[in-house]
Image (cartoon, rainbow, N blue to C red):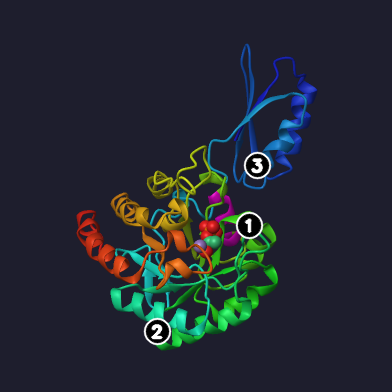
């Protein structure tokens, strides 16, 4: 970190600031030029609050030399993290395929879809039991009953289950019963939830917030990792832009960006990004081509009557065809499906 001081800062003021920074455990070296006074901070600056330094009236500007995320940073962990979920790996050579309905609706629906997607090649079953809906009048999910139905579907198919948590009070239960705990876009910065998930030992699927940048996503991963749970899978699900044709704008550039900055795996959710079922296929292909570690896709047996997100859900036969078409693309980028 570099602190630039105003030109007229007195020696006494420089010493006071230097002492207060050294008290935070870093070494400070001073460079005094004709027009500039610069303090270079060396050591672990992760606990130093940038804005607190800027509050000092003698400070002109504070600049980061390193990213503020440490545990998620590739610099300190050059090998990609491969996350083990009951023997299946996410982040390795094999593309992770997560599929299922937006919401668990009833036993027949979730078991039927689970069996279909498993037969087509999916490795994990998704399904929301707790739904973060924009309107309080929309279907809110079956809550704990939905969780029980997911467990039945897991028992019948052997597919690990991925489902969204909304409350920090449910972490213990999810940690016991769910294979991958999903944090939805709307909760990406629910820091109390992230801190609780840091104490869990299940992998966390962390979705990018609607208006969050890449650094904010990595800082949210850092919250979970700082608590001791290093099994974080990042997920791009589209961000809010001025475009209204699609539900969100899929930011595929996040994949190479994350590969440069972090060792964590990143998967793509083309369903919530596009909000249109017919865009799922081309966006999935692009996601694999750009190097994503997996896809989470909404699949429903009867989209026209789905209780949530039918407009962006594909039918099992479309999912099957998509996986077949993805195989050569995966192979072309050195991966397998
Ligand atoms: C979901 O995956 O069901 C969901 C609600 O997604 P997001 O949090 O990305 O909107
Ligand atoms: Mn959905």
* Label pair 2/1, CB-CB below 8 angstroms: no
Residue on which the image places disc 1: 134
Q: Give the image quarter of residue 220.
A: bottom right
Quick check: 166 left or right of 275?
Answer: right
Q: Earlier in the sequence, mark 3 or mark 1?
A: 3
Residue on which the image places disc 3: 26
Number of other residues with Cα within 10 Å of mark 1, as a class: few under 14, some 14 to 19, many 20 or more: few
Give how far apart the Cα atoms at labels 3 and 1 are.
45 Å
Quadrant (top left, top right, bottom left, bottom right) of the N terminus: top right
Question: x, y (%) of residue 328?
Answer: 19, 59
Say if disc 3 is inside 8 Å of ligand 1. Answer: no
Question: x, y (%) of residue 98?
Answer: 40, 68
Residue in view at x 55 percent, y 56 percent: 221
* Label pair 3/2, CB-CB below 8 angstroms: no
Quick check: 132 left or right of 21?
Answer: left
What span is in magenta?
A: 217-225
Residue 158, which numbered label? 2
């Amino acid at each position: 970190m570099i602190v630039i001081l105003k030109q007229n800062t007195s020696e006494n003021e420089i010493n006071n600031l230097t002492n207060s920074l050294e008290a935070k455990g870093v070494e400070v070296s001073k460079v005094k030029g004709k027009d500039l006074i610069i303090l270079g901070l060396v050591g672990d600056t992760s606990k130093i609050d940038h804005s607190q330094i800027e509050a000092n009236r003698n400070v002109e500007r504070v600049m980061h030399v390193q990213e503020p995320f440490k545990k998620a940073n590739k610099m300190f962990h050059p090998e990609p993290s491969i996350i083990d979920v009951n023997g299946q790996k996410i982040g390795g050579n094999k593309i992770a395929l997560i599929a299922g309905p937006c919401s668990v609706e009833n036993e027949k629906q979730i078991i039927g879809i689970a069996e279909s997607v498993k037969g087509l090649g999916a490795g994990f079953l998704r399904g929301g039991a707790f739904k973060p809906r924009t309107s309080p009048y929309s279907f809110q999910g079956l809550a704990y009953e939905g969780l029980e139905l997911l467990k039945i579907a897991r028992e019948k198919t052997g597919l690990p289950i991925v489902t969204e948590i909304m409350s920090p009070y449910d972490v213990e239960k999810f940690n016991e019963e769910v294979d991958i705990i999903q944090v939805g876009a709307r909760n990406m910065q629910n820091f109390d939830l992230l801190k609780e998930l840091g104490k869990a030992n299940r992998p966390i699927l962390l979705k990018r917030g609607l208006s969050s940048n890449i650094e904010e996503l990595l800082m949210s991963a850092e919250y979970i990792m700082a608590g001791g749970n290093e099994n974080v899978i990042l997920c791009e699900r589209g961000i809010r832009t001025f475009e209204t044709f699609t539900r969100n704008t899929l930011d595929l550039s996040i994949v190479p960006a994350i590969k440069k900055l972090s060792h964590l795996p990143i998967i793509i959710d083309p369903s919530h990004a596009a909000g249109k079922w017919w865009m799922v296929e081309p966006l999935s292909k692009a996601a694999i081509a750009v190097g994503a570690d997996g896809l989470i896709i909404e699949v429903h047996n009867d989209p026209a009557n789905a209780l949530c997100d039918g407009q962006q859900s594909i039918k099992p036969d479309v999912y099957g065809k998509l996986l077949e078409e993805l195989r050569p693309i995966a192979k072309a980028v050195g991966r397998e499906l």
